[in-house]
Amino acid sequence: MLGLTMRTASLVGTAVSSTSANGRVQRQSPTRQTVRVNAALDFAELEEEVAAPKARAVRKDGLSAKEARQSRRFRAAQKAVPGRMQPQLPEQAVALMKANSNTKFVETAEVHARLNIDPKYNDQQLRATVALPKGTGKTIRIAVLCSGDNIAAAKDAGADFAGDEDLVADISGGMLDFDLLVATPDMMPKVAKLGRQLGPKGLMPNPKAGTVTTDVATTVGEFKGGKVEFRADKQGIVHVPFGKLSFDEGDLLVNLQSIVQAIDANKPTGAKGNYWKSLYIASSMGPSVQVELSAIREQE
């Protein structure tokens, strides 16, 4: 160890004896002496360590640890897009995202917005919905917990499942063949009993998500037509799908603009300073492209 070190040595003396006045020999305990020795500072060793830092291990193929975990397809696509901190115009960003898709299936287009918020505080949490004008390109299965005439109204609007006690019993038994659960306010006490089944799947109805409503027909129609929920994760990043790569570039731009407007409209009251940090778009299996936020707002 570099620096000033202290070495301690203990020296034990021999026993000392003395004669008392009555002639008896008294033995005293041996004396112990402690000696501290200061080691000299080795500056030469310190200079060698600073001058020659420890070399990192290099793979034979020359790839970093992060690149080694990426596929050849992804690395090739990443070389074709601009690097980080090089924002592109919305039209150029969407074109690059579509051009670098080379999978065997139709990928989903995703928005990743980094915001200047800390969701651990209640007044900086973000959770809302946005209706995508051009839809999501995905078929969503909706279940509705309601009673009376609302059951027929929900089914007429396109709900895959609708019911009262019978649907509660099915869900309690493990039936989760739906992507979204909508409930009327009077059914929420019954929904609370399904927390173990719905909670881990993120299917609990919530007023902020627009899934607790009295107008089940309108709500089902909106979600079937492209309404999606979004929220900020622990790092303050919002992830939202905004279509499929099979969409026209113009349709993707319209959906992207709607998401930016919805995030601005639902700005938390506790957000301070610059609300937006960065905005990226990417396909499900492709590299991300940074988008110039001001250019999107100019199109509003």
Image (cartoon, helix red, strand yellow):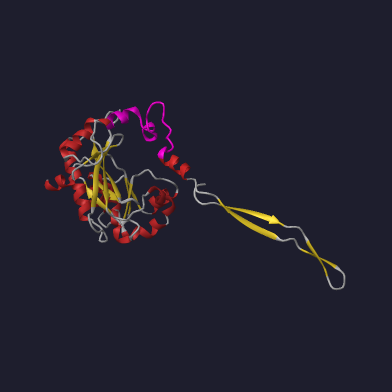
In magenta segment, residue 63 = yes
Name which quarter of the figure residue 286 lies in: top left
- Residue 293, compared with residue 36, is above or below; it is above
Name which quarter of the figure residue 98 lies in: top left
Residue projecting furthest to the top: 61
Which residue is drawn at the image coordinates 39% and 47% (left, top)? 201
Residue projecting furthest to the bottom: 21
Q: Position of residue 271 (x, y in %)?
A: 26, 58
Residue projecting furthest to the right: 23
Which residue is drawn at the image coordinates 20% and 37% (left, top)? 93
Residue 40 vs residue 176, the one in the foreground: 40
Answer whether residue 300 is visible to the viewer in this image.
no
Name which quarter of the figure residue 148 lies in: bottom left
Q: Position of residue 300 (x, y in %)?
A: 12, 48
Q: Position of residue 176 (x, y in %)?
A: 39, 45
- Residue 71, compared with residue 211, is above or below; it is above
Answer whether residue 262 is visible to the viewer in this image.
yes
Residue 35 vs residue 213, the one in the foreground: 35
Task: Count the numbered circles shown.
Answer: 0
Q: Position of residue 11 (x, y in %)?
A: 68, 55
Which residue is drawn at the image coordinates 44% and 37% (left, top)? 54
- Residue 73, compared with residue 269, is above or below; it is above
> Which segment did they paint magenta?
51-78
Left or right of 97 on screen, residue 37: right
In magenta segment, residue 225 = no
Residue 248 vs residue 184, the one in the foreground: 248
